[in-house]
Amino acid sequence: MNNSELLLDEEVLKKFYYEPHNLGNHRIYRRVLIMEKGGLLGRIADYKLLDFIVPGMTLEELLPLVKPISDVMMQRFLLPGEGKMIKKSFGWGLKGWAYIGFLEGEEKVLDDLREEFRRALKPYSEGFG
């Protein structure tokens, strides 16, 4: 089965706060999280984390599209298949980071996305519904 044949249950992904989006001709799923940094005097700062489940793209197709986004500190992308995680920093980390990993990877920073991806996978025989 190739990546374009992977079917995800969007209702399951919605339970994890993912929303469907189109990136060119590809359907992806995005989740926005807002993290709060606190200290002794209370809240210091907020920053955004974007998670993407990208079932129908290859690493080569995705890489040119991964760029810094204003007010976003971390972007995490999960692709199907196997491979070694790629970590990109933007402006020496001052403009954020991106982690690009794979469903069959082992890096702990993406374990939550892997679990959500696996829960949303539909058997190919179910089709779109």
Image (tube, rainbow, N blue to C red):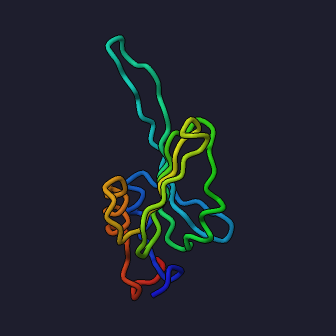
> Which quadrant is home to the N terminus?
bottom left
Q: Residue 71, relative to residue 109: is it above or below?
A: above
Q: Residue 14, relative to residue 35: is it above or below?
A: below
> Given the current orientation, which residue lies at the most extreme right position?
24
Kindly identify the residue that appears in the image at 49 percent across and 33 percent down. 47
- Number of numbered discs: 0
Q: Position of residue 10 (x, y in %)?
A: 44, 65
Q: Residue 19, relative to residue 10: is it above or below?
A: above
Q: Quadrant of residue 83?
A: bottom left
> Given the current orientation, which residue lies at the most extreme top position?
41
- As drawn, is 115 to the left or to the right of 79? left
Q: Position of residue 76 (x, y in %)?
A: 47, 53
Q: Quadrant of residue 107?
A: bottom left
Q: Nearer the viewer, residue 36 or 96?
A: 96
Q: Nearer the viewer, residue 37 or 14?
A: 37
Q: Quadrant of residue 90?
A: top right
Q: Position of residue 123 (x, y in %)?
A: 36, 82
Q: Nearer the viewer, residue 3 or 19?
A: 3
Kindly identify the residue that appears in the image at 49 percent across and 85 percent down. 2
Q: Nearer the viewer, residue 27 or 3?
A: 3
> Given the current orientation, which residue lies at the most extreme front position?
92
Q: Position of residue 104 (x, y in %)?
A: 35, 72
- As drawn, is 118 to the left or to the right of 99? left
Kindly identify the residue that appears in the image at 41 percent across and 63 percent down. 11
Kindly identify the residue that appears in the image at 66 percent across and 62 percent down. 64
